[in-house]
Image (cartoon, helix red, strand yellow):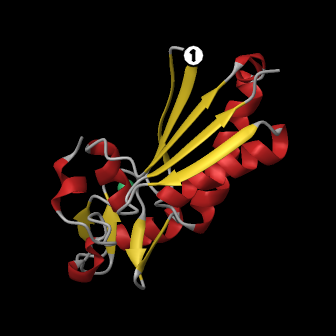
Amino acid sequence: MSGKRDRTITNEDPYHPEEGLKEPAICDGCGALYRNRRWQLDAQAAEVESANPEVSRVSCPACQKIAEKYPEGVVTLRGAYLWEHEEEIRNILRNEESRAMSQNPLQRIMRMEREGDELIIETTEQKLAERLGKVLHRAHQGALSVTWSDDHRLCRVGWERLL
Ligand SMILES: [Zn+2]
């Protein structure tokens, strides 16, 4: 467990240091551009800004969480139905990630791996975990559960379908 999660109990996300962030800034990891107080994935705009001598080179909050293995959402999928429809389900999740990223590039799947009989998906933001669970539930029914940690730092989503 990361010490960051235990340090203080506030609703502040430790990975949103935007207050001190100079604009424009470009993430060295993913190329996201920080401008007008928001992150965006716009390759053309980022290329134009990279010629700007004032641009800051940083690591965006999503890339920091991925580097430090600090998920804010964990989705656990299980049940025989999952493995019979694994490819389709993985595609649904990846498509939903793309939709989420087009709205907010900091919402990403940081890991999607089979562990024993479960498929574990870790996300950089809580909302994305909830969103993945809901889209899967809409498309494939099953049983969905969403729980938040007491400090609202971590969202755990469970989904199961046997037949
Ligand atoms: Zn980044």
User: Is 119 rendered above or below residue 143?
Assistant: above
Question: Where is residue 3 shown, x and y percent of the image?
Answer: 17, 49
Image spot of residue 101 (x, y percent): 57, 58
Residue shown at the point (61%, 31%) measured from the top left: 77
Q: Quadrant of residue 34?
A: bottom left
Ligand 1 position by quadrant: bottom left
Q: Locate the C terminus and report the quarter of the image it occupies.
A: top right
Q: Which residue is mark 1?
A: 117
Q: Is mark 1 within 8 Å of ligand 1?
A: no
Q: Is residue 68 above or below residue 155?
A: above
Q: Say left or right for 132 vs 64.
A: right
* Relative side of 4 to 61, left or right: left
Residue type indicated by callout 1: Asp
Q: Residue at x 76, y 44 (%)?
A: 137
| Res 51 seen here | no
SS type, badge 1: loop
Which residue ends up furthest to the top in the rendered image? 116
In the image, farthest residue toward the front: 150
Q: Is residue 57 above or below residue 146?
A: below
Q: Residue at x 83, y 42 (%)?
A: 139
Q: Nearer the viewer, residue 140 or 144?
A: 144
Is residue 48 something one can see in this rendering? yes
- Count neighbours of disc 1 (C-alpha within 10 A) and say few if under 14, some if 14 to 19, many if 20 or more: few
Closer to the camera in the image, 137 or 40: 137
> 112 or 119: nearer the eye?
119
Q: How many marks?
A: 1
Which percent across, then down, holds residue 53?
23, 75
Q: The N terminus lies in which quarter of the figure?
A: top left
Residue 36: x, y in percent?
Answer: 42, 85
